[in-house]
Image: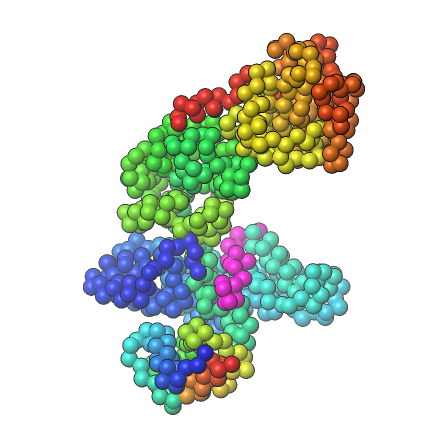
Amino acid sequence: MMMTQQQIYAGLTQVMCDVFDTDDITLTPATTARDVAGWDSQAHILLIVAAEQHFGVRFGTADFESMRNVGEFAALIDAKLKN
Amino acid sequence: MLVWCPPLSDPAGALRAARAIEKPERRLSALLTLARHDRDALCTHKLDTSISALMAGGASAAAGLAARRLAVLGSHSVEHLLPAIRVGAAARGVAAATHVGGYGQFRQELLIGDTALAAFAPDTILLATDAAALLPAVPLNSTQEVADAAVASATESLIRLWHAARSRYGAMPLQQTLARQATALIGCNEHLLPGSPATLAAELDRSIRRAAAREGVPLIDLSRLPEAIGSNLLIDPVRWHQAKQLINPVLAPLFGELVAQVLAAQSGKSRKCLVLDCDHTLWGGVVGDDGLAGLRLGQGSPEGEAFAAFQRYVAGLARRGIILAVCSKNDETVARSVFDLHPEMVLRSPDIACFVANWQDKASNLRSIAATLNIGVDSLVFVDDNPVERAIVRRELPEVAVPELPGDVCGYPERIAAAGWFETVQLTGDDFARATSYAANAHRALASAQATDVDGFLSSLDMVMDARPIGALDRARAVQLINKSNQFNLTTLRRTPEELQEVLATPGALALAVRLRDAFGDSGLVSVVIARPDAALPADAWLIDTWLMSCRVLGRGVERAVLGVLLEAAKKRNVSMLTGMFRPSGRNHMVEQHYASLGFTACAGGDGLPEDATYWRLAVAGAVPPPHHIKVHHDDDAAADLCRLDAGHV
């Protein structure tokens, strides 16, 4: 299934609001864990799991090195959706 | 995921509404209600945030929750499981404060001591360990002795940790069982390699369970969890390699429930009494409308078998000390008649401590059941197939546990077991006292099974046979046997229900339904015999045109006892000759000598009788009934009093 960048960012924003239990998150490609309150290692895994469920994709052990910011995360989701 | 809990149609909306409640006590109560619904991991996290904030504010004591201080010490990551433990515990009436040990530091924390853990002052310490962290390294080609020594030493060091939890921290240890993580190197015959990681883990798991029982250490048994829910594995290798999370965070609510069940049991919050609806819950059909004979229960239909299996599960719970009660919308005499008279009922009136059948609302009846039994309403689990009744009871009496049930009764036992309301960390004398009579029976059966000679064995079975004319309640099973049995079937004469009905209505004919039970249980309807006058024979002779038996009871002497019944019935009706018929079908060799072995002599058939058969006869007058070890109840005149009684109901 194809999604536009806009759709992916909208989806990611929704997932993050859900995981961080807030409705006040604005994402840019440069956003990192440091920019979001509560984004610790525990929340990171919840985020990955929630994104998997939301987008219907599955990340593997090889994927986690390329998730340093939201831009890379979105690009990875985009690549998975195209496969 | 929590299949025994009712689903929430709009979790986000419900959570928003609960959080918006101003008064803390009412907010907590609304949040706890949500916690008793099916919920995914994220919803559980959010509930935890709100509930924990209220608990920190001191709301838990007011809500009547028991306080627990649980430390989780792990050889793998456990932080992600804490919210689910706290929410699950809160839903079961336990306010659990939690502390997590340092990753992989469980030995030092327990044996040497840890200031943070001491400051937390746990009353319960859960050891979440995996096999690799417990077992010493042994070579793959180890002998059995070396492998056994490794398992023994790992068990010993765990026991020392349990002792340390008690002596150093004054805490009750809980031990997580081992997950199946190691991949087999051989497969089915992995045990051929005593040193393989999978074999060692399996052996250590067994050893831990035995040691825990000896040491009085409750287990958190991971094998009770499903291996996967949909595509989510309980143990996801990606999460293991990514974060050393043994339990998949998506399934954390399930793990939380397991721990919560044990914490609740430890806090005296386990349930004591199972309250059962009747129609469509214990049997198929409505006794008031369908009558006893119209119920689907026991042998004869898959649904009937499933209801009987559910009753056996319930009987097992009773045997280990769970009190049973009935709460049914019925006339009491009608509902009781099933327990007292239906031959396929597993549960009987004496099994039911409190029997309430009337037309009042079930919430009031549940209150009165609790009052009668002198237990709290929060000790009840209510099982009802009707979703409307379940919803009403949940609304009127939130303290009563009401499991969601699948549409098919065959799923009831697993569903009720999964909910874990009857968890116990220790069996007490009281539990056994409730089960004394059952235990005595079990001892008798065990003793008699040790008899070595055949006669001794047979007499030790305490067999009781019930032979009576096929009645309305037997018809379905009798037709099934007539059309299904092949081996112990003298004539393989198939009959439709209508044809059987015709025989039953024939003057001078006798169609027997034979039931057998013994010390080990009830075998149900096991044999059908039809004897009738035939135009080809003298008027005072019977032709036995059907004699069949279920192979489950071969070699018990049932056929000998049946002959005794036939002879008595024949005498009573002035029948002087029994004529047996054996028609080979290609599958019934085993009964070729049936009549010879019962003392019949071979004879010619006669005009009008099938030619593809051998014939045997026995004069009633001089016949000596063959010996057997079965106590026989029979009434060859009256089919089932049940049928008469039944006619009265319909």
The quadrant where residue B209 appears: bottom right
Residue placed most toward the observer, B143 or B630: B630
Q: Is residue B217 visible?
A: yes
Residue at point 45%, 65% (across, down): B252
Q: Is residue B356 magenta?
A: no
Query: In the image as oriented, which residue stretches furthest toward the left?
Result: B22
Q: Is residue B226 magenta?
A: yes
Note whether B347 is above or below B21 in the view shown.
above
Residue at point 36%, 37% (across, down): B327
Residue at point 54%, 33% (across, down): B476
Residue at point 24%, 59% (across, down): B25
Can you say which quadrant of the picture contains the C terminus of chain B? top left
Residue placed most toward the observer, B481 or A70: B481
Q: Is residue B58 visible?
A: no
Note whether B363 is above or below B100 in the view shown.
above
Residue placed most toward the observer, B332 or B81: B332
Can you say which quadrant of the picture contains the N terminus of chain B? bottom left
Which region of the structure is painted magenta?
Answer: B214-233
In-image side of B180 versus B9 (left or right): right
* Image position, residue B13 (x, y; %): 28, 65
In-image side of B641 versus B208 (left or right): left
* Image position, residue B271 (x, y; %): 40, 46
